[in-house]
Image (tube, grey):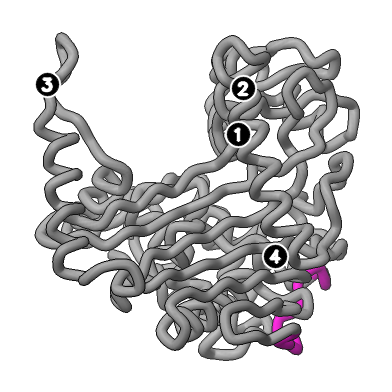
Amino acid sequence: AAEPLRDFCAQVFRKIGVPDEDARCAADVLVTADLRGIESHGIARLGWLYARRILAGGIVPCPQVRVLNDLPVAATIDGGGGLGPPIARRAMQLAIAKARQAGAGFVTVRNSNHFGIAGYYAMMALEHDCIGLCMSGTNPWVVPTFGADAILGTNPMAVAIPAGAERPFVLDMATSAVPIGKLQANERLGRPIPAEWATDERGLPTTDPGLVLRNVRGSVGGGLLPLGGAGEETGGHKGYGLAMWVEIFTALLAGAPLAQPADHPESAGGDSRMTNVSHFFGAWRVDAFRPVDEFRADMDTLLRRMKSSRKADGQTRIYVAGEKEFEAMERRRRDGIPVPKEVVADLQQLGSELGVKFPGDASTGSC
């Protein structure tokens, strides 16, 4: 069940010096990712990406967060090297507050860390009748079109738009062909990857996920391809352009480090290097443009028009962005979150080290 997992994660964060409110925020972000079926960003990352990096000194558990350049519609936040989720939540709250006052609000963040799923923060705007936007830089995993070295991050972006009777439209995506978690999952399972996902050290397609991961971490060359794949024929230059857009809106506007060759503080045992990740958040009040009820009704019409349009042969359903995740959330709130045995073992080990009991039946890998 979600609540015991959320409580376990929060206890782990508190044990290593994270203040209670920040601990609960970070735990909620991780569990929400699992509820929405985005396991690559869920509790599986609690140990190696968050807790062990805090213990190693790579993340400041109780940072001094400062608001800089505070204007009526814009601001910059320095996260003090702290945990990404509470920093990101504060930044999105500030963007929403500015939107409620001025019609729109934009906040950049520097000196932060990995913040989980971008959609979590974009969706915060929905309850305020606002459209939410979130972007984040990441460690460099992606080669530019026609390039051989990983220079850009997977640079995710998310937008959340309210509807009426229909679920909100929530697009949450990386600007790479796939997120790095897909390579990690295929490596664990010993499965090859499609040649359209990544390149080797020469910049040529490869189906070996372990080779790509080792090459990028070792700064040998190669990496993930942009959304659209290699070259221009399949639109890879468009994914490359989107990744550059995120890089500009996050790193450049916030004054954070720019695209650079790979240097990855993501080892399983924790790492003391600071990552200085940057983010961008935006919120717009719908009623700054037109009445909210009219907009919501038209969103319902648009969403229904997509889903009711003619299906391709052999297909039974057309989805809109966010629909699968909302359905997964309903299902997993009811039936529980599936937790792989290797994740259970990792979290049990982490809990044992910190004196926090992992909930559930470890023999089945469920909670």
Residue that badge 1 annotates: 176
Report x, y in % for residue 352: 59, 70
Q: Residue at x 32, y 78 (%)?
A: 128
Residue carrying label 4: 113
- Majority SS type along the magenta span: loop
The disc labelled 2 sits on which kind of residue? Gly
Earlier along the polypeptide chain: callout 2 or callout 1? 1
Q: Nearer the viewer, residue 120 or 67?
A: 67
Q: Are marks 3 and 1 in contact (CB under 8 Å)?
A: no
Q: Mark 3 — residue?
A: 310
Left or right? Give the position of 226 relative to 64: left
The residues tagged by marks 2 and 1 sit, at their Cα atoms, a distance apart of: 9 Å
Q: Which of the image's four quarters has the C terminus?
A: bottom left
* First in residue order: circle 2 vs circle 3: 2
Identify the magenta region.
Answer: 56-68
Q: Residue at x 69, y 53 (%)?
A: 137
Say above or below: 40 vs 19.
above
